[in-house]
Image (spheres, rainbow, N blue to C red):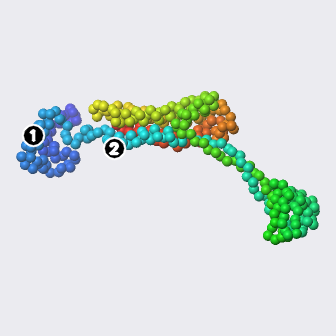
Amino acid sequence: MADGDKKSPEKRRITERERFRYIGFEVFRGAPKDLFKNAAEKEKYEKILAAKRDKGEVIREDCKLLEDRVSMSERIVLAVSSIAILLSLLLPWYSAYREVTKEKEVVVEEAAVPVDSLLADSALVAQAEGDSLALAAAAVNTVDDGVVADEGGPEVQSHAGRTSREEIITGHQAKKQKERVYTWLSGFGAFASLGEVGGGLFSSGFVLVVSGILMLLYGLLCIGLPVLNLYGIFGLKGTPDEVAIKLKKLLRLNWLPIVLFTGVVFLSFFGADYGFSTEETFKSFGDSYGPAVLLGSLSWGVFVAMAASVLVAVKGIEI
């Protein structure tokens, strides 16, 4: 028979003192010290333990299992976050702009011409230059004291210069300038204007219709979730474990806003055609619906609600 198959002789069992010595990789080296200073202290402690066992208390004091799963400070943070979700409906949720064309008058040319040369050579200047400024200068009447009377059109004006023998001719031109006029819509305002914008929205492409419905549900969740959260934080009854389990289920619902928003962003990549004329409504909508139009139309109220809901939902994981 091989040596490996032979039974090894029975080893000596260690004593309780040796076991205590090597607990925790010899944290307590050497002989252990007495837990009690004297016999009276030991007897007092044993009486306390016997009284607790008689009452059915088997868990030691300051046990981590007895701590609250949701402390009061955490409840306050959850309550503030839930109220922030509701108040976000008062903030701007959507923004768009129109382009308004305005005319602006600018000076295109300004020239100082001696009065003598205007009177003597006005016809030659008009023929040589061939522009509206010289032709208008020929039609200006002057008097001996240097006062100039303007008989030109609205685009060309003349007035006396620094001296009585000088006249300044100025040309003006109206240029068109486009300005953006922004319009904001809050969360509650979106519900109020649903009848006005709903017709054009729901007559558009399938993707835009579904996206509109999802954002409508997003807004409704911002009303319902805070109510459920506050009820779970302060209204649930039962043992601490029962309350914690019920609260955990309620807080998980706060992931729904970010799920809906992710779905809206995903659908925007498919694009959609409008059922209304963007020239008559808002220029920022472009020619068709897409991710750029979506992100450009959303305002910071949507993201405040999302951040607060995520903060509440994360606590549901920790419980």
The residue closer to the viewer here, 243 or 92, is 92
Above or below: residue 51 compared with residue 24? above
- Can see residue 311? no
Amino acid type, mark 1: Lys
> Residue 223: x percent and y percent?
46, 34
- Camera-side mark, 1 or 2: 2
How many numbered circles does the render carry? 2
> Residue 140: x percent and y percent?
87, 61
Q: What is the spatial separation of the Cα atoms under label 1 and label 2, in whole angstroms?
A: 37 Å
Snapshot quadrant of residue 63: top left
Quadrant, the C terminus? top left
Write the residue at 82% across / 71% down. Answer: 163
**Residue 73 numbered mark, or none:** 2
The residue closer to the viewer here, 41 or 129, is 129
Query: Label 2's element?
Result: helix
> Residue 118: x percent and y percent?
89, 65
Above or below: residue 36 compared with residue 59? below
Amino acid type, mark 2: Ser
Q: Which residue is mark 1?
A: 47
Relative side of 230 to 131, left or right: left
The residue closer to the viewer here, 210 or 105, is 105
Quadrant, the N terminus? top left
- Can see residue 95? yes
The residue closer to the viewer here, 172 or 276, is 172
> Residue 264: x percent and y percent?
55, 34
Relative side of 18 to 106, left or right: left
Query: Label 1's element?
Result: helix
Write the residue at 12% across / 40% down. Answer: 48
First-in-chain label (1 vs 2): 1
Write the residue at 11% across / 37% down. Answer: 50
Write the residue at 50% across / 39% down. Answer: 89
Label 1 crowd (10 A; few <14 / some 14-19 / many >=20): few
